[in-house]
Image (cartoon, helix red, strand yellow):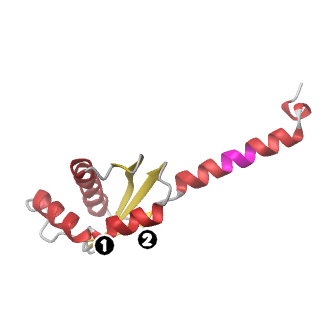
Amino acid sequence: MQESKRQRQVGQLIEEEMASIFQKQGINMIKGGMVSISKVGVTPDLLEARVYLSFFKIEHPDVLLEEIVAKTGELRKELGNRLRHHLRRIPELQFFLDDTLDYAFKMEELFKKINEEKGPEATGS
């Protein structure tokens, strides 16, 4: 099912505000790595927001995700303070690990390895 215009608007608004909150609280640069919000999906009733986080150069992303999930109440309260004039109800936040960046890097490495195994004749002349 495709997202409605309002779902996209609310998702974009939440994404922008959550990025600002992460930056303010220092969550975006943590443990020598970087945390970014790759996407926010909102349910049709606008009561749940699924926040997908992308981690860069973080050794244990699962542990960091658990730490962020533990702060969900605090993050939702801050989001509520910022969006109280835009939304009647602040959505419940759910955080997920977005591993598409890792997947892309792994695929790129595989393609490099395949090209190296084929040797110079694969480059074509």
Q: Is residue 66 above or below residue 111?
A: below
Q: Is mark 1 on a helix, strand or loop?
A: loop
Q: In this view, does 68 lie above or below 28?
A: below
Q: What residue type is labelled 1?
A: Pro
At x 73%, y 49%, the residue is 110
Task: Between residue 63 and residue 56, name the one nearer to us.
Answer: 63
- Magenta stretch? 107-111
At x 26%, y 67%, the residue is 71
For label 1, the crowd category at 10 Å Cα-Cα, with few meaning under 14, some 14 to 19 and many 20 or more, is some
Q: What residue sits right under mark 2 in the picture?
A: 1
Q: Quadrant of residue 103?
A: bottom right
Q: What element carries label 2?
A: loop
**Which numbered dot is residue 44?**
1
Quadrant position of the N terminus in the picture? bottom left
Q: What residue type is labelled 2?
A: Met
Q: Image check: 123 left or right of 74?
A: right
At x 9%, y 62%, the residue is 84
The reply to whether the C-beta atoms of the residues labelled 2 and 1 are less than 8 Å apart is yes
